[in-house]
Image: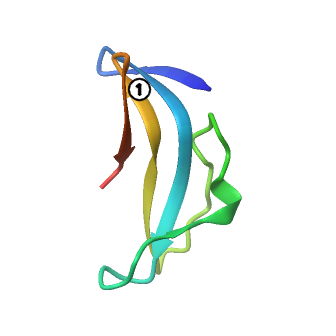
Amino acid sequence: MLISVVCDLNYTVKEPTRQDRDDSNKNWSIVDSTLNAGELCPLKPDISREYQLVGRFAVVDEEDYRSSR
């Protein structure tokens, strides 16, 4: 589990992963190598694909599923 402070707000990374897709008309797929509970899923992206970070995060102790999009 990773606890950080961004813009004076505490957030905890609980179950993050990355998803990718070929373009905005396709469905998102989980990037298997990023299924690392408690880490921010390091990834060297392929510039031709779209990516998003998704998972379970707690921001100021309010836990929810969130995405970077």
* Tag 1 residue: 58
Q: Is residue 33 left or right of residue 48?
A: right
Q: Is residue 7 left or right of residue 16?
A: left
Which residue sits at x=47%, y=81%? 48
Which residue sits at x=36%, y=44%? 66
Question: In this figure, what is the number of numbered marks?
Answer: 1
Q: Is residue 4 left or right of residue 42?
A: left
Residue flagged by tag 1: what amino acid is it?
Ala
Which residue sits at x=67%, y=64%? 32
Q: Where 34 sits versus 21, above or below?
A: above
Quarter of the image with the C terminus is bottom left
Q: Where 20 sits versus 44, above or below?
A: below
Which residue sits at x=30%, y=85%? 25
Q: Percent x, y for residue 14? A: 54, 32
Q: Percent x, y for residue 67? A: 36, 50
Q: Percent x, y for residue 39? A: 62, 37
Q: Is residue 56 left or right of residue 66?
A: right
Quarter location, residue 1: top right
How packed is label 1: few (under 14 Cα within 10 Å), some, or many (20 or more)? some
Helix, strand or loop under label 1: strand
Q: Where 18 sits versus 8, above or below?
A: below
